Amino acid sequence: MIKFIGFDVDNTLCELNSRIKDSTLNYLHEIKDRGVKIAFISGKPAIYLCGFVRQLGLSDITVIGENGAEIYYDANVPPKKTLGANIEKSKYLVKLKSTLAEQFGNSIWFQPNNINVTCFFDCNELKVRIRNFLNDIFKSNVYNDNLEIYEHIDCFDIVIKGVSKGSAIKTLCSYDNISLDEVLTVGDSNNDFSMFDISKISIGINLYQDYDVTYKFDQIDDALEFILNNLIGD
C-alpha cells in the first residue's frame, strides 16, 4: 500500500512558471484525504515552495527544496520541523558560484538558493557556453568528487554529490517510519531519477530523457486519476 507520494513541481504538477490547474489540485486533495503523505520536491528553495503550497490549501504537506538539500516538515513559516541534509561540501559551491559569476557576469542569473547553485540562461548559445565551461571545471577532482550537475531546459543545477531528492525522501521516510516499499514518486527529468530509483513505484510525466520508470503519462491529471483508482486504498 502506498503511504507516501513525492511530486516534482515544475513540468510535472504544472507547466514551468504556470499555476497548478484546479483539476490537478482537486486530485491532490483527494489523495491527501485518503491518508497518503504528500511531499512537493523541487530544485527551488524550500521557502519558495512554502508559499506556493499554502496558496493551494496544502500547508500541512512536506516541502523538499534545492533538490533535497532542504527538508521542511510542513509549509508553515517557520516550519514545525526541519530535517537538514549533510552540506559539509557546500564550500565548493561557494567557490564555483564565484567562478561562474566572474566568467559570465550579468548574462546569467542565480536563483537565490541557500545551498545549491542554480544558474539560469536566456538562450541556447549561452547554455552551450556554460555547459562547456562547467565540463572543463569538472575535469578537476576537487569539483567532480564533491559536486554534480543537473542540466535543464532553462538552467543548470549544481548540487552536493550524495544530496538528492532520493536521499531526502529516505531521510523523511526514516523519520516517519515509512518503508520505501510504500513510496511512489512522480517527476519529469534527470534530477528526479534519484527518487525514482529508491521508490517502489515511479511515474514519469513527459520524460524528456529515456529512463526506466514503472509508468509513463503525458498528462499529470491522467497519472493522478490512475494513482487514485489503482495504487492507493480508499
Image (cartoon, helix red, strand yellow):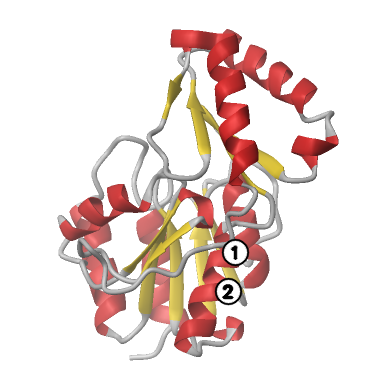
The answer for how far apart the CA atoms under marks 1 and 2 are is 6 Å
Task: Give the percent coordinates (x, y) of residue 83.
Answer: 44, 70
Residue at left offset 52%, top offset 46%: 206
> At label 1, which amino acid type do we have?
Gly
Residue at left offset 44%, top offset 9%: 106
Give the secondary structure at mark 1: helix
Compared to 214, does 173 lie above or below?
below
Q: In the displayed structure, does residue 222 sit left or right of residue 87?
A: left
For mark 1, does the 10 Å Cα neighbourhood hold few (<14), some (14 to 19), or many (20 or more) residues?
many
Compared to 207, does 58 lie above or below?
below
Task: Give the percent coordinates (x, y) of residue 70.
Answer: 44, 58
Q: Is residue 124 visible?
A: no
Give the secondary structure at mark 2: helix
Q: Nearer the viewer, residue 151 or 97?
A: 97
Q: Is residue 5 visible?
A: yes
Q: In the displayed structure, does residue 231 sit left or right of residue 96?
A: left
Compared to 79, does 165 lie above or below?
above
Q: In the displayed structure, does residue 136 sit left or right of residue 120?
A: right
- Residue 74: quarter of image: bottom left
- Residue 182: quarter of image: bottom right
Label placed on residue 166: 1
Q: How many marks?
A: 2
Task: Give the percent coordinates (x, y) of residue 208.
Answer: 60, 40
Task: Give the percent coordinates (x, y) of residue 16.
Answer: 37, 36
Residue located beneath label 2 in the image: 170
Residue at left offset 49%, top offset 61%: 186
For mark 2, does the 10 Å Cα neighbourhood hold few (<14), some (14 to 19), or many (20 or more) residues?
some
Compared to 24, does 209 lie above or below?
above
Q: Nearer the viewer, residue 150 or 212?
A: 150
> At label 2, which amino acid type do we have?
Lys
